[in-house]
Every structure is written in structure tokens, then in C-alpha cells.
Image (cartoon, grey):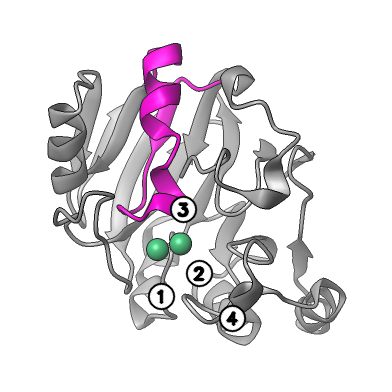
Amino acid sequence: MKVIYYGHSCFSVVAGGKHLLFDPFITGNPLAREIDVSRVPADFILISHGHDDHMLDAIEIARRTGAMVISNFEIIEWLAKQGLKKMHALNHGGGCDFEFGRAKLVNAVHSSMLPDGSYGGNPGGFVIETRGGNFYYSGDTALTLDMQLIPMTTRLDFAVLCIGDNFTMGVDDALRAAEFVKCDQIMGVHYDTFPPIKIDGAVAKSRFNAKGKTLHLLQPGESCDL
Ligand code: NI
Ligand code: MN
């Protein structure tokens, strides 16, 4: 599946010809200055939790593209108050079939407050099943034993895991997460954007290699097939 990285935890996966855009945060990212947010395609926008660094550009992109926003109930309610209409609310453990395939909202251990201080519900991750392949996006989270539930139902082609430490899993826990979800192709996100989450990418890649796994660390604007 084609994956396009827009920096921080913002990436897009092309499934069944549809662009699934995750956690849009581009205009606030000092490392993503070359990305023109007005040209980012989206048919669906999936938001893991309410923090600014995961949804800063969501409303603008949704308005421009007419994409359907998928998130938890509280975030969808909040976006409705901002005037968005084409949306679908999930809650944890629940999934739904869309044009691209199935999206399920799964647990993440983190916090979630919306930009104006409103309650953002519980943060989540997504398991996506499509005809072209399956993947898991962890969102911002600690390592959790719940991740072991994912491979019981879904054989993953790749997983997108936070690895920046400080606010989320670091490299070591992301490696354990890769083992929990039984996946060898990992794309790292939520690193380097701000000083507290800087990582040594070469060291991180070698840690994954040592366990027979591949860690993909893309540059903003770069894409790859996973
Ligand atoms: Ni967060
Ligand atoms: Mn974050």
C-alpha cells in the first residue's frame, strides 16, 4: 500500500483509490514547511485524539476536500460545532465499513483535550482492513498489553507506531509493540518534531533490524510502499 508521510504523526495511506489521511498537523510543524497543506489530498480524515499536533489542519482540509472525518464520539461532536457535517463517530472496540474497507477504533493510553480545552474523549488508535492490505496506527500511546489483541483478528501488513519517547512510546517500547502486534514492517511517527522527542534514527533502525524488523523513517513529503 502506498504511504505518504507529511511529518510528525500525519500520513496518508492510499486504499482502494481513496486517500486516508491520518492526524493532520502540517502548518504547525517546523519540519514540514515544504508541504503545501492546500494540496494535500484526502477522501477520509482519521483523527486519533484531540491534541493540536494531531488535528490542527483537520477542519481546513475537511472543508477543502469534502473528506469524511472519522474519530471518536466526542471529537466528532466538537467538530460538528465547528460546522463540519460529513463525519462518522466510532467508540473504542467498534468498527465500521467504509468505501475503503473497515476502520476499528482501538485503545491508546494517553490524554485527549481539544484545542479550546473541551473534553476530547478517550484517545485511540485505528486498525484498518482493506482489500489491498491491513495496518494499525497506534496514535499517541504508551505500550499496552491490549496491542496483543490486534493480531488475534487482523494480520497486519504494516504498523505505524509512535517512537519519540517523552509523550508516547520510545524506540524500545515501539519495538515491543511491533512484537505484540506481530508485524515486521514498522513506520515510525511522532519523533524529531520538537526537542523532547528527538531520536537517533540510525540507532532506532538498527534496534529493529536486530529483531528482524524494518523501521521506516520517512522525510516529510516522502512516500513508500508498505
Ligand atoms: Ni497527544
Ligand atoms: Mn502528539
Spatial separation of the CA atoms under disc 2 and disc 3: 25 Å
Spatial separation of the CA atoms under disc 4 and disc 3: 17 Å
Quadrant where the image shows the N terminus: top right
Q: Between 8 and 210, which is closer to the camera in this rendering?
A: 8
Q: Circle 4 sits on which residue?
A: 170
Q: Circle 2 sits on which residue?
A: 181
Spatial separation of the CA atoms under disc 4 and disc 1: 18 Å
Foreground tag (4 vs 1): 4
Dot 2 or dot 3, earlier in sequence: 3
Residue 9 position (above or below residue 201):
above
Q: Residue at x 13, y 30 (%)?
A: 81
Residue 113 position (above or below residue 24):
below
Spatial separation of the CA atoms under disc 1 and disc 2: 6 Å
Range of the magenta residues?
41-67
Q: Circle 1 sits on which residue?
A: 148
Helix, strand or loop under label 2:
loop
Say whether residue 226 is magenta.
no
The quadrant where residue 28 appears: top right
Q: Residue at x 78, y 66 (%)?
A: 214
Q: Amino acid at mark 2?
A: Val
The quadrant where residue 106 appears: bottom left
Q: Circle 3 sits on which residue?
A: 53
Residue contact at pointers 2 and 3, CB within 8 angstroms: no
In the picture, measured across the screen, residue 140 lies left or right of residue 35, that is left
- The answer to whether residue 115 is seen in the rendering is yes
Residue contact at pointers 4 and 1, CB within 8 angstroms: no
Dot 4 or dot 3, earlier in sequence: 3
Dot 4 or dot 2, earlier in sequence: 4
Dot 4 or dot 1, earlier in sequence: 1
Residue contact at pointers 1 and 3, CB within 8 angstroms: no
